[in-house]
Amino acid sequence: AQSVTQLDSHVSVSEGTPVLLRCNYSSSYSPSLFWYVQHPNKGLQLLLKYTSAATLVKGINGFEAEFKKSETSFHLTKPSAHMSDAAEYFCVVSEWDGGATNKLIFGTGTLLAVQP
Amino acid sequence: EAEVAQSPRYKITEKSQAVAFWCDPISGHATLYWYRQILGQGPELLVQFQDESVVDDSQLPKDRFSAERLKGVDSTLKIQPAELGDSAMYLCASSLRTGGLQELFFGEGSRLTVL
């Protein structure tokens, strides 16, 4: 079975400083990996996804993530945090059997706080 | 911009009562998902539909939960009877089709509180 582990439940940064949200995955084969963001009282929104075409994936709002197979990691980064980045972030792996069933396995989330 | 619509946004009920949640996916999306998100945890899949057919309900507590998507468009998730442990956010999502790289579009959720 596939799984993801988000190493930090809370991260606090100052506005304008870099953001690093850590995620490790467990998969028996080449995984499909995603980062989703959830703002308060809003639905989840896709930030980026790993498609195996490139190990460095660029997403929306200046976020990017690097797939490192040797470290089984898919950490999310952003060079400079903005107040609007304050939200909960979920690392996700897709458990797709190649057929009709596509189950997303979510991590427990990392709550990002951005201080002025 | 097309969105996934869910209602009600908030529901408070007493245990042993029946509750129902409704979801209208993005037009043309064949795949619909219901997820449950308990406070402090990530969402967990309850049921997945492909058009009107259930393709995965392995995590759905079938003794009290039911879900349907009769015409392959909107969907209803029902709980009867509700228990205290059912307090959670119920999220509906849709995707154009199934597949490992499909982007899921989520609604804003229905928050259930069972007293």
Image (tube, coloured by chain):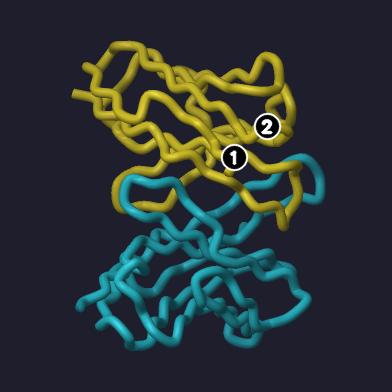
* Mark 2 burial class by Cα count in 10 Å: few <14, some 14-19, many 20+: some
- Classify B68 as above or below A113: above
Query: Camera-side residue: B39 or B31?
Result: B31
| Residues indicated by labels 2 and 1 sit on the same polypeptide chain | yes
- Classify A95 as above or below B24: below
What residue does disc 1 label? B2
Q: Quadrant of the C terminus of chain B?
A: top left
Q: Residue at x 70, y 22 (%)?
A: B72
Q: Residue B28 location, x and y as percent?
A: 73, 33
Q: Residue B96 location, x and y as percent?
A: 73, 42
Query: Camera-side residue: B15 or A49?
Result: A49
Amino acid type, residue under disc 1 in the picture? Ala
Q: Secondary structure at mark 1?
A: loop
Mark 2 or mark 1: whose residue is earlier in sequence: 1
- Classify B5 as above or below A5: above
Is A50 positioned to the left or the right of A6 in the image? right
For residue B27, which numbered disc appears in the image? 2
Do labels 2 and 1 touch, CB within 8 Å? yes
The chain letter for the residue carrying disc 1 is B
Q: Residue B46 location, x and y as percent?
A: 53, 35
Residue A55 sits in quarter: bottom right
Residue A83 sits in quarter: bottom left
Q: Residue B92 location, x and y as percent?
A: 51, 36
Q: Residue at x 64, y 77 (%)?
A: A57
Chain A image colour: cyan
Q: Give the Cα distance between marks 2 and 1.
A: 8 Å
Chain B image colour: yellow
